[in-house]
Image (cartoon, helix red, strand yellow):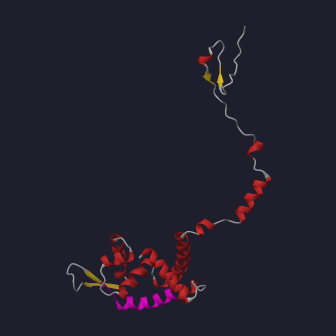
Amino acid sequence: MSYDVPITPQAGKVAEKGAHPATMVLAPKTPRTPSAKALRPSAKVAKSAATSAEQVDTRYLQSLMGYNARRAALSIIELFLERLAPYGLKPVDFSVMSTIGHNPGVTSRQLCAALNLLPPNLVGLIQSLEARGLIERKPHPHDGRAVGLHATPKGQALMVQAEQTATELETEKTAKLTPAERKTLVALLQKIYF
């Protein structure tokens, strides 16, 4: 009697010729490769992909506070960079100069805390503004170890113009908002980071 290699009722197990059923081994399964036809998308799927590429769904992103805040900020900063370029001020320069201008004698430590800046980043910026003649250092009246930062007359004149430009560009960029909505939006944003 001849034994062929029978497949047992248990899927995947094969009996070797003359082997006892207890010594059956698992037969290796050969992976099925899909045919070329199966790999091609159906006309329905292809049409759906074409339609979805034309209409990008960003509803989830638009539900996120960070996404909306970032998009709004980028929109304003783009115009800010363009309009304040003649003053030689980047957003961080502007923030530092404005804070110094409205707080004569402010210390570097206070600036870092108020503007969320790292001290090493502020050092170079202060040196740059000082080299341009926009700020000067003076002894602090209450702390002998600290130095107060002051806008020079040149820095003050520059910031009057720069702040006016910043106000105008923000009003222009938020023209779809009423003054009350603008004020509410600023107050709501401040609730997040203050």
Depicted 27 relative to depicted 78: above or below:
above
Residue drawn at x 49%, y 83% is 84
Question: Is 69 on the left-hand or right-hand side of 20?
Answer: left
Image quadrant containing the C terminus? bottom left
Residue drawn at x 58%, y 88% is 178
Whether the magenta-drawn stretch holds residue 69 is answered as no
Whether the magenta-drawn stretch holds residue 156 is answered as yes
Residue 34 location, quadrant = top right
**Which residue lies most toward the right here?**
43
Image quadrant containing the N terminus? top right
Residue 114 location, quadrant = bottom left
Residue 37 rendering spot, x and y as whole percentages: 78, 43
Question: Is 173 on the left-hand or right-hand side of 42?
Answer: left
Mark count: 0
Residue 14 rendering spot, x and y as whole percentages: 66, 21
What residue span does the magenta drawing correspond to? Answer: 149-167
Do we see residue 121 in this rendering? Answer: yes
Depicted 155 relative to depicted 56: above or below:
below
Residue 75 rendering spot, x and y as whole percentages: 56, 77
Depicted 53 relative to depicted 100: above or below:
above
